[in-house]
Amino acid sequence: MQVISLLDDSVFPDVLSMLAHCKTKHNFDFLAVRQKLQLDFHGSVKLVNYVRQRVHDGKSVTEAISSSDISDDKYLKPVLDDDALIIGLFDLPEIEVESSDDKTGKTVDPEEIAKRNAELEEQLSRMTLQFDNYRQSVQQLLDERWGDADQAEAEARENKGKGKEVAEEPLDPSRYYWESYAGNDIHETMLKDAVRTDAYRDFIYHNKHLFKGKTVLDIGCGTGILSMFCAKAGAAKVLAVDASAIIAKARENVFRNGLDSVITCIHGKMEEVTLPVDKVDIIVSEWMGYCLLFEAMLPSVLFARDKYLKPDGLLVPSHTNIWVAPVADPEYVDDNINFWRDVYGFDMQAMQTGIHAEARVLHMPEAAVAGKPAAVKLLDHYTCRTEDLSFTAPYISKLTKDIDNLDGFLVWFDTFFAPARDTHETDVVLDSVADEWKVARDIESRVAFTTGPFNTETHWKQGLLLCKPEADKDGKIVPAAMKDGAEVKGDITFAVDEEHARALKLSVSWNGKAQSWSLK
């Protein structure tokens, strides 16, 4: 690591040589100031950033720095990006403890000394835990930014040029998935989805007795919000796992909120990491994707359930079910499909190629739903298996109005948070409706939400499967009008897309017709 001087632009290979330079050239002894103020790691970080800020502002720096000068928590924020000095603080000599004699020269009672030593040891233990995650996070960022990956690639190229065979690491087909969760935008969208985030918060906070003193596993922790809910609810230990680079920011979020003594952030895939415990009491995860099963994250939760969850442990959420309903929305079809036949007077029919083969994600207006929704699949998270996530299920829907044409199908899901495992308390069945189930017993410990078109929009919206219209021999669309009360029935199939591990392939048959869509 290259350490930039505190007081000028000089660069040094290590922290101690840089501090020696500051002492001889600028008459500033960082270690002496640190000793005088009896600073722990926390305080040393503040001292570093205080000095760097003054230098940045063109102000003088002397050793006459007091505790009050660096008391503001704003000095916890690094002034210099990727400041190697902060990492180097761990390797500085330990602070000498002040004499046990007080200011009057009287010797302190040996019992008091022993008591104070015990307090200091406890404090040191807490600080070690508190800053371990911080150090890992900063070190990871330094590794990523300062060339570990580049160096490995350079060595591989050099070996290849010399004729040496280099074992190539197999490409992870899900790499794009982890990378998509490394940025801020997707997490901001999810956190601002009040239906989603409030549901998890409400269940955890309304059931603090279930979390108090327990060990919790948070799978796909993202920014760490669910882990922090659990810690605030009284969990003794929370293990936050994520394979995305967002884990570095989760560590900092946990640290800044003073919860790092409870929450341990672990970077890696759930199937590959080694947890520091044999079993957990509760598994929390927000694994749901578009049309529920897009992104294929539920298998990771089921893996953790089978390997780590205690026999009487809880899954949060506990159940989900999938709904489908017929759609008739001629205005949407005109704006998004027929639009291409007259674009500023030009026929762009070529743009319609494959337009009915891809599922769309959007929040449809309630009026677009033309028939009664049908529940097609219930997933009990305690008992379902990975092979249950590819299925074909029947459905029947009766139209609730006359329509000129069946334009497609709408797919959404409901999510249930049951506070107990027994069926008497759970009673979630195939056609359970989130709002009805939630208020069935009028107790706060029950939480559920829907992503359907009849309620508040969520970031999941719904999946729209547009039907390809029938045409005559001249290519002219043939309307297929249907009356109120007519049945639309058939099967719906969910399957894994063979080309994209985390994508979804959907098929629907209806009244003798059939079509497939992909959701990528």
Image: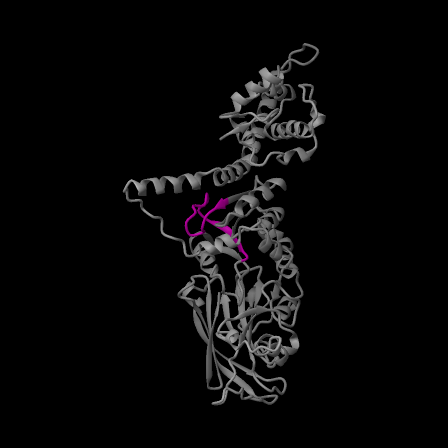
Count every numbered label the image shows and give the total: 0
Q: Is residue 112 above or below residue 471?
A: above
Left or right: 474, with 198 as reference point: left
Report x, y in % for residue 301: 47, 57
- Examine the rendering and report whether any part of residue 68 can be seen: yes
Q: Quadrant of residue 157?
A: top left
| Residue at horizontal 51 percent and vertical 29 percent from the top | 2
Q: Residue visible at 46% across and 43% down?
A: 276
* Magenta span contains residue 278: yes
- In the picture as drawn, the residue positioned furthest to the top comes out as 105
Extent of the magenta region? 266-286
Q: Is residue 487 above or below residue 24?
A: below
* Residue 417 at x, y percent in the picture: 58, 61
Q: Nearer the viewer, residue 360 or 217?
A: 360
At 66% across and 19% down in the image, what residue appears? 63
Q: Main secondary structure of the magenta part?
A: loop
Residue that lies at the very extreme toward the right in this rendered image:
68
Horizontal and vertical percent for residue 372?
59, 80
Q: Position of residue 351 (x, y in %)?
A: 52, 73
Asked if one can make out residue 311 in the rendered structure from this viewpoint, the answer is no
